[in-house]
Amino acid sequence: MSQPRLLTPKDVRDTTFTTKGFRHDAYKADEVDEFMQDAEHTIRILAHTAHNTWKEQQ
């Protein structure tokens, strides 16, 4: 897997995954896993930033 990256709302809206095999409802797990890793990374950074901003204002 590649290094996590920060996602934009456009990334979330426009992301598609390659279907696997003959079934068109099965996705390649590595693509979904990488997207989920990026989503987790983005949320973690935003939560950390929001928490630090809140602490500074106290």
Image: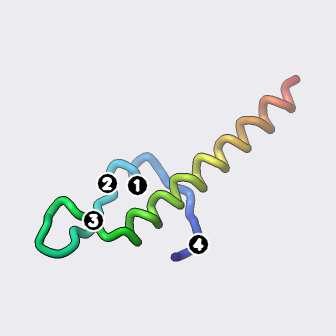
Which is more toward the observer, 28 or 58?
A: 28
The residue identified by callout 1 is: 11
> Could you tell me how far apart the alpha carbons at marks 2 and 4 are, in whole angstroms?
20 Å
Task: Check contact, mark 1 vs mark 4: CB within 8 A.
Answer: no
Q: Nearer the viewer, mark 1 or mark 4?
A: 4
Task: Check contact, mark 1 vs mark 2: CB within 8 A.
Answer: yes
In what element is the residue under mark 1? helix
Residue drawn 29% across and 60% down?
A: 16
> Could you tell me how far apart the alpha carbons at marks 3 and 1 are, in whole angstroms?
18 Å
- Residue type pointed to by label 2: Asp
Q: Which of marks 4 and 3 precedes in the sequence?
A: 4
Neighbor class of circle 3 (other Cα within 10 Å; few <14, some 14-19, many 20+) is some
In what element is the residue under mark 3? loop
In what element is the residue under mark 4? loop
> Could you tell me how far apart the alpha carbons at marks 1 and 2 are, in whole angstroms?
5 Å
The residue identified by callout 3 is: 27
Which is more toward the observer, 44 or 52?
A: 44
